[in-house]
């Protein structure tokens, strides 16, 4: 009985080894298999992933990432350390959240020697359904595998199996070619078989490649424009459609997302569609929540009328396929795929396109969420960049230039406000507080912290007469060290006071690690105000700030700015500061609005990688009448 029970097992083992041999895989790195391991690691956020194929006395790892030595160098594991062999034996997925808590796996060598604290493996099979190995994800910490993670792993395993089938079929095709040389009578038949196998393999490879590219490319998208741009080339290998369009469902309409690099006329002419419009396949796909296929113009006329057929003509298309895009909670829109010649969409191709539409729906859902957050953050940031106060005593101008990447929300800000008139030495001309700062980060959190710091600094200033910049910053440091705020950044906080009975003013400032302000005197000379303290950071605790004072002759110009103006990747920051000094010296006599425009156009072109803030203040020049 024992010998009879082992015979199928031995037969299966021999068939498996032959299939692995035909696939050309050994205990060595394989580019395609390594790619699958990287995709598993990236999509499931695990440190270790590999493609495992089980042999008689070991499992080989042609694709892997994250495995420690000496196993990584050997590209093989003994069967005693193999969890994947259980997948091969059962032919089913194996999912273990914490093997150390499992009676069966607690003493398994893979737990002690490989650090396996969580395991998920999906079968890899050939065209006959024979399980050759597994595609697995491994974590060094116990984890509960989510349904979405297991679904992604299953999709990747299906694509990996298709790759294995392709290689095996290619080997079989080569064998068939050899048979042709020895059997002339069967040559034509074998040739037809070889062509059929090759076509099927190529089609399978195209579908697998589409799913792989969709999962890899669309996982990196940021906004709707980025999603639309990537769709343009994504479907080139599957049936070669002539057009791929994206419509997003709104509250009361269905709107095209135009190609940002050259939208078609239809995307401009019919920018929005009412969801109840019965004359278009796309709105029917949305309304009925199903895939809609139109084989040709005659079918379009019969089902939707001449208006829809004319639209198809303007698109230069014959066949149209519309797939609903399902997000995690709602229907996100419709994917429109067109072919310029009549195209039959088979079962396999339709299944592949439907699976790819799932990745597209996820990307659209994420893009809409990010776009909404970015819009809210931009509005919040703009609301906190208040208008400069009106004054007849000094000139002021500010400029804000957002980063080139619209998804980077910075913490840069400027502020200016008068102090109570009781603080002014002449009883009439009020002193002025000005601030420029930069909170670390490029997201909603940075914008929120910026608003809090800005308000806290105003309060700290007004609560500590005689309104010393250093005292206000010291109070801000103390508050940030106690409050639960992740505060980090730099700023310059300055006070300008008129000198009684003259056109002179006095500048008093405190610098918390910020780029040094620039002061231009009427003779055109520019000075860097280099004195500074450490940056603002809650972990540094309360810090007694210092302040510095400088006399401002009539007609002096003070320029404050953030590092986005002078700090660029691959550029010398000192050279940029020198250029800024030269621009201020050359154009400092111009109106402040014109001065800031010239500086920004020269130093922030091309568009900056970080937000840029400029704030300029000019004291009255000689000969200008003073308001009394």
Image: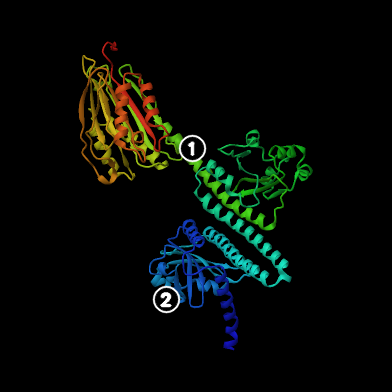
Answer with left or right where residue 226 lies relative to residue 501: right
Residue at 68% from the left image edge and 39% from the top image edge: 315
- Which quarter of the rendering shows the C terminus? top left
Crowd rating for badge 1 (residues with CA inside 10 Å; few <14, some 14–19, many 20+): some
Q: Is residue 622 above or below residue 161?
A: above
Secondary structure, mark 2, is: loop
Pinpoint residue 296: horizontal percent, then vertical percent: 75, 46
Q: Is residue 107 visible?
A: yes
- Up-down relation of residue 180 to residue 294 (above or below): below
As drawn, is 139 to the left or to the right of 193? left
The residue at which mark 1 appears reads as: 375
Query: Which picture quadrant has residue 484?
Result: top left
In the displayed structure, 477 sits above or below 185; it is above
Please state which of residues 235 and 44 is positioned toward the viewer in this rendering. 235
Residue at 28%, 33% (x, y): give it: 492
Disc number at residue 107? 2
Please tell me whether mark 1 sits on a helix, a strand or a loop. helix
Q: Which is nearer the N-term, disc 2 or disc 1?
A: 2
Q: Quadrant of the N terminus?
A: bottom right
In the rendered image, residue 196, in percent from the top left (x then y), is placed at 68, 62
Count residues near mark 2 (Cα–Cα under 10 Å), then give few for <14, some for 14-19, many for 20+: few
Q: Is residue 342 left or right of residue 66?
A: right
Residue 595 percent location from the top left of the image: 36, 23
Query: Which numbered dot is residue 3?
Result: none
Q: CA distance from mark 2 to mark 1?
A: 53 Å
Q: Quadrant of residue 258?
A: top right
């Amino acid at each position: 009985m024992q010998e009879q029970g082992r015979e199928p097992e031995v037969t299966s083992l021999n068939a498996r080894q032959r299939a692995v041999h035909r696939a050309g895989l050994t205990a060595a790195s394989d580019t395609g298999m390594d790619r699958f391991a990287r995709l598993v690691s990236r999509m499931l956020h695990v440190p270790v992933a590999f493609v495992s194929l089980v042999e008689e006395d070991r499992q080989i790892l042609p694709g892997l990432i994250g495995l420690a030595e000496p196993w990584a160098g050997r590209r093989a594991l003994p069967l005693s350390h193999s969890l994947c062999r259980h997948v091969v034996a059962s032919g089913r997925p194996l999912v273990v959240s914490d093997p150390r808590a499992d009676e069966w796996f607690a003493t398994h060598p893979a737990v002690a020697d490989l650090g396996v604290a969580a395991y998920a493996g999906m079968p890899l099979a050939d065209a006959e359904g024979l399980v050759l190995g597994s595609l697995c994800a491994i974590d060094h910490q116990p984890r509960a595998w989510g349904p979405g993670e297991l679904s992604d792993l299953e999709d990747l395993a299906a694509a990996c199996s298709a790759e294995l089938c392709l290689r095996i079929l290619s080997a079989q095709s080569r064998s068939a070619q050899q048979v042709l040389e020895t059997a002339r009578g069967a040559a034509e038949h074998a040739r037809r078989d070889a062509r059929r196998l090759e076509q099927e393999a190529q089609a399978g490879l195209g579908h697998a490649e589409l799913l792989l590219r969709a999962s890899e490319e669309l996982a990196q998208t940021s906004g709707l424009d980025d999603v639309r741009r990537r769709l343009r080339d994504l479907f080139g290998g599957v049936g070669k459609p002539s057009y791929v369009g994206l419509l997003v469902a709104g509250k009361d309409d269905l709107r095209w997302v135009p190609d940002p690099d050259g939208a078609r006329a239809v995307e401009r002419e019919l920018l929005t569609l009412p969801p109840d419009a019965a004359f278009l396949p796309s709105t029917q796909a949305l309304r009925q929540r199903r895939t809609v296929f139109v084989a040709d113009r005659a079918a379009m006329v019969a089902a939707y009328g001449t208006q829809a057929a004319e639209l198809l003509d303007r698109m230069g298309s014959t066949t149209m396929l519309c797939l609903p895009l399902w997000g995690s909670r709602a229907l996100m829109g419709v994917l429109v795929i067109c072919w310029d010649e009549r195209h039959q969409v088979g079962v396999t191709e339709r299944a592949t396109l439907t699976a790819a539409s799932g990745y597209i729906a996820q990307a659209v859902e994420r893009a809409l969420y990010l776009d909404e957050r970015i819009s809210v953050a931009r509005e919040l940031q703009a609301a906190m960049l208040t208008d400069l106060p009106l004054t007849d005593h000094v000139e002021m101008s500010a400029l804000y230039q957002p980063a080139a990447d619209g998804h980077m929300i910075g913490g840069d800000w400027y502020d200016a406000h008068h102090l109570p008139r009781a603080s002014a030495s002449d009883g009439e001309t009020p002193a002025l507080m000005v601030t420029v700062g930069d909170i670390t980060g490029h997201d909603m959190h940075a914008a929120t912290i910026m608003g809090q710091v800005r308000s806290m600094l105003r309060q700290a200033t007004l609560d500590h007469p005689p309104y010393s910049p250093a005292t206000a910053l010291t109070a801000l440091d103390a508050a940030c060290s106690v409050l639960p705020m992740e505060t980090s950044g730099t700023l310059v906080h300055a006070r300008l006071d008129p000198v009684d009975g003259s056109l002179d003013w006095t500048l008093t400032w405190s610098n918390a690690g910020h780029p040094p302000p620039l002061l231009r005197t009427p003779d055109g000379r520019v000075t860097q105000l280099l004195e500074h303290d450490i940056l603002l950071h809650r972990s540094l605790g309360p810090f007694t700030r210092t302040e510095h004072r400088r006399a401002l002759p009539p007609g002096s110009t003070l320029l404050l700015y953030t590092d986005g103006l002078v700090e660029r990747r691959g550029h010398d920051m000192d050279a940029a500061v020198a250029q800024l000094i030269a621009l201020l010296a050359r154009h400092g006599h111009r109106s402040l609005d014109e001065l800031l425009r010239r500086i920004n156009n020269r130093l922030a072109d091309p568009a900056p990688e970080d937000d840029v803030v400029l704030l300029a203040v000019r004291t009255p020049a000689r000969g200008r009448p003073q308001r009394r």
